[in-house]
Image: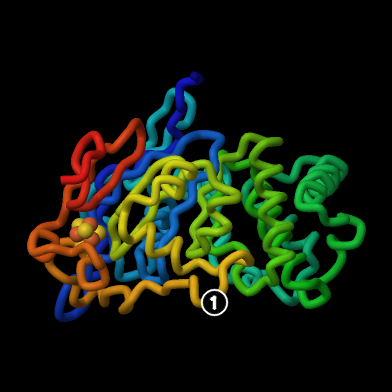
Amino acid sequence: MAEKEILVAFDDVTIEYEMKKQSLRAVKDFSLEIEKGKITAIVGESGSGKTTAVSSLLQAISTPGRVTKGHVYFYDNSQKIDVTALQGEELRSFRWEKVSMVFQASQSTLNPLMTIYDQFYETAFYHNAVGSKEEFQEKLRKLLDLVKLDSKRVLNVYPHQMSGGMKQRVMIAFALLLDPQLVILDEPTTALDVITQKYIFNQLIEINKKLGTTFILLTHDIGIVAKAADHVAVMYAGSIMEYGDVYTVFGRKMHPYTNGLIDATPSIIKSADQIEPIPGSPPDIRKLPEGCPFHPRCRHSTDLCRQQMPKTVEITDGHMICCHLYQEGGAAK
Ligand code: SF4
C-alpha cells in the first residue's frame, strides 16, 4: 500500500473570539491531517466551526477571532511551514499560490463592472503570473476547459451575463489560477439546483484526478461527501467527533452524531417518515454544555457524558472517534 503523504497538519488548534465580556471558544483542540492529492470533507451543521477551523490555514479568521493555541503546518516538499507564523509578503504569496479558498457565496465577490478576463488578469498580474499574452490566454482556455466552460463565450462577459452555476465554476477556475497545491471549497454549491451541484462535483473529482490537486470541502450535505470525498471529519460545537475514510465512517455508523446526520439526510429511496431530524438544535457557543457537547441531543447520553468530554480514540487504522461509547480498538465500553 502506498504510504500516505501529508500536506497540511492542524495541530491542536483552538480558536477564540475575544468579546467585551467574555471569550468565546469556536474551535477546540482541532487536530487533523490533510492527505496530499485527496479530497477531505469537513461536515457539520451551521455553526459547528468548520469554516473557522479551516480559515486558520490562511490566517483568514474573521475578527476578533484568533488562534489561541496550536499550530497549522503546511508541508511544501521537504519544507515544513508554520502557517500561523507567516506574515507580510510570505503570507500574501502563500495565499493563492500554495492554498486558495472559494468562500461561501463567493460568486458575489466577482466585480460586476469588470469582464471575467480582466478579473483573471488582475489577480494574475498582482502575483506576477501573467507571462506573455498568448501564454496567459492559453492558460485561461485550459482552466475554463477544466470546469467545462467555453473561454470564447465566458471571458468577455460580465458576471450578470452568467447563470449561478457558471459563476460558481468561474470561481473554481479562479481558485486554480495560480496552480495551488490545495483548494478549500466552502459550501461550493449552496443555492444551486441539484443537477448543477452534481455536475460541479463531478468536475471537482475530475480535476482532483487529472491535476492531483488536494481539496478540502466544507459542507453540511453528507450526500455530497459520500460521493466526492476520500476522507471525512465530522464536526460538532468546534470539535471533531469522528474522522476516517468515507466508507468506514458512513458504513460503520458508530458515532451517535454521525448517525443522526445520516438519518436526517433526505434521499429518493427514503419516504418522508423515514427521515429523522436530530432533536434540538446545535449549542450556542456562549453557553456550551459541560461534558460532551452533543449530550443534550444524544439518545445514548449517560451521567459520564454530562460530566466529562470524551477522549478521541482510534477504533481501527485511521478511524478516530470522540465518544464515551467507544474505547481504543473499538469495543463498546
Ligand atoms: Fe452521545 Fe455520550 Fe457519545 Fe456524546 S459521548 S455522543 S453524549 S454517547
Front residue (pair 16, 221):
221
Residue 163 image-quadrant placement: bottom right
> Which residue occupies the extreme top position in the image?
1
Name which residue lies at 63% across and 52% down: 175
In the image, taking residue 159 as reference, residue 66 lies left or right, namely left
> Which residue occupies the extreme right position in the image?
152
Q: Residue 227, relative to residue 135: is it above or below?
A: below
Front residue (pair 52, 295):
295
Residue 293 image-quadrant placement: bottom left
- In x, y percent, where is residue 195? 73, 65
- In x, y percent, where is residue 1? 49, 19
- In x, y percent, where is residue 201? 66, 54
- Which residue bears the numbered disc 1? 272
User: Helix or strand or loop: what does disc 1 sit on?
Assistant: helix
In the image, taking residue 123 as reference, residue 302 lies left or right, namely left
Task: Evaluate whether residue 138 shows in this view.
Answer: yes
- In x, y percent, where is residue 216? 51, 49
Name which residue lies at 83% across and 56% down: 149
Q: Label 1 is placed on what type of residue?
A: Ala
Judge: label 1 CB < 8 Å from ligand 1: no
The image's colouring method is rainbow
Name which residue lies at 74% across and 45% down: 130
Q: Residue 245, relative to residue 268: is it above or below?
A: above
Q: Residue 42, relative to residue 76: is it above or below?
A: below
Give the quarter the ligand 1 occupies.
bottom left
Front residue (pair 69, 39):
39
Residue 150 image-quadrant placement: bottom right
Q: Residues within 10 Å of mark 1 (few under 14, many from 20)?
A: few
